[in-house]
Image (cartoon, grey):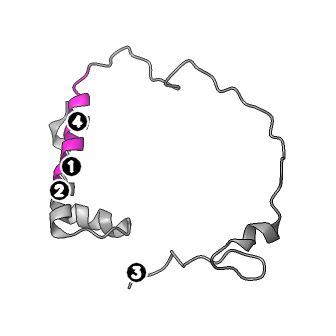
Amino acid sequence: MNTDRIMKIDKSTVVKIAELSRLELDEHAAEEMVVDLNRMLGFVEKLQEVNTDGVEPLIFMTDETNVYRADIVKDEVSQKDALSNAPKKDMYYFRVPKVIGNSD
């Protein structure tokens, strides 16, 4: 195992991840996240010690297959009915708060 590639998470990495994820973490939560993420990385490092020589990668986790049913249209909801209970709407669409953009 190549120990030069062992990654450790520090607080600045957690702060950056939280920023990219649009999460707000207080000081205590950030410290807990550092511990948790490093624990997860430790688990992955432990898995790297397992000898997998001669083991073929799995494509599927089980031998089970999905049984699909035909799509059948039933009881359609009209646009008018769908919009009738909407908390905010305009003539044809649901109105929702903006979620993309600067957080400032």
The residue to which callout 4 is attached is 43
Q: Tag 1's secondary structure?
A: helix
Q: Tag 3's secondary structure?
A: loop
Residue shown at the point (83%, 47%) measured from the top left: 74
The residue to which callout 2 is attached is 32
Q: Tag 2's secondary structure?
A: helix
Residue shown at the point (39%, 16%) measured from the top left: 55
| Amino acid at dot 1 | Asp
Residue shown at the point (26%, 29%) measured from the top left: 47
Q: CA distance from mark 4 to mark 1?
A: 11 Å
| Amino acid at dot 3 | Ser
The residue to which callout 1 is attached is 36
- Residue 73: x and y, percent? 84, 46
The N terminus lies in which quarter of the figure? top left
- Residue 68: x and y, percent? 72, 30
Residue mark closest to the camera, 2 vs 3 = 2
- Residue 85: x and y, percent? 69, 71
- Residue 63: x and y, percent? 56, 18
Q: Earlier in the sequence, mark 3 or mark 4?
A: 4
